[in-house]
Amino acid sequence: AQSVTQPDIHITVSEGASLELRCNYSYGATPYLFWYVQSPGQGLQLLLKYFSGDTLVQGIKGFEAEFKRSQSSFNLRKPSVHWSDAAEYFCAVGARLGGNTPLVFGKGTRLSVIA
Amino acid sequence: DTGVSQDPRHKITKRGQNVTFRCDPISEHNRLYWYRQTLGQGPEFLTYFQNEAQLEKSRLLSDRFSAERPKGSFSTLEIQRTEQGDSAMYLCASSPRQGGNEKLFFGSGTQLSVL
């Protein structure tokens, strides 16, 4: 069974600073990986996803993530954080492209942005 | 396309009462998922429908929980004899026929508080 670990429960960054949120996964086959963002009281919005090919994927809102098979990681990055990026971020792993297997989510990392 | 709609947004109930939540997926999305999210946790899969057929249920879905999707459109999630441990955000998501778990669209959720 697949699993996801997000080691950082809460991260605080200054506006304009760079950001990296960590995600480690466990899965026996090729994983399909996702990052979602959740604002307070809202549902989840997909930021980006990795299925195959280029290991650096670009997403919405200026986010990117890099898949590193050797480290079982899929870290999310942003070069310059905006105050509106303050939210909860979830990494998720899916078992099969186009399949029905439900996504497995990490526990999330809460991002705070200070002036 | 109005997105995934969930009703109500908030529900406060007393322990032992029954509650029912509704989810309206994006039209023509044939797959519908229910997730539960407790404080400080990521979403956890509860159950999944393809059209009107309930194809998978998590062991988290105790016999007090029942979900239906009678005409393959909207879905309801009922919790009988609620317990304080049922307090959570209940999220619904849908995906199109072509896409599966990589094209999930989430609703804003129903926040349940059991007193």
Image (spheres, coloured by chain):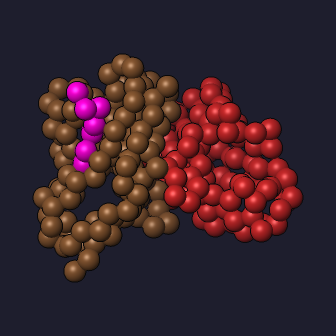
Chain colours: A brown, B red
Whole-percent x and y of residue A50? 26, 34
Whole-percent x and y of residue A114? 26, 77
Q: Which of B50 and A79 is in front in this view?
A: A79
Name the residue at 60% across, 32% down.
B49
Name the residue at 47% across, 37% down.
A104
Quadrant showing the C terminus of chain B: bottom right
Decide if residue A38 is in sight here.
yes
Whole-percent x and y of residue B93? 51, 45
Name the residue at 29% across, 32% down.
A72
Q: In this view, does A99 lie above or below A89?
A: above
Left or right of A29 on screen, residue A64? left
Magenta-colored stretch includes residue A84: no
Whole-percent x and y of residue A36? 36, 49
Q: Is residue A72 above or below residue A30?
A: below
- Taking the view exactly as shown, the residue that stands out farthest to the top is A29
> In the rendered picture of this protein, how many numbered marks are placed on residues?
0
Q: Which of B37 and A48 is in front in this view?
A: B37
In this picture, which residue range is highlighted in magenta?
A70-76
Decide if residue B98 is in sight here.
no
- Taking the view exactly as shown, the residue that stands out farthest to the bottom is A115
Q: Nearer the viewer, residue A10 or B58?
A: A10
Left or right of A68 on screen, residue B98? right
Magenta-colored stretch includes residue A73: yes
Left or right of A56 on screen, residue B3? right
Asked where in the image residue A113 lies, by quadrant, the reply is bottom left
Name the residue at 17% across, 26% down.
A53
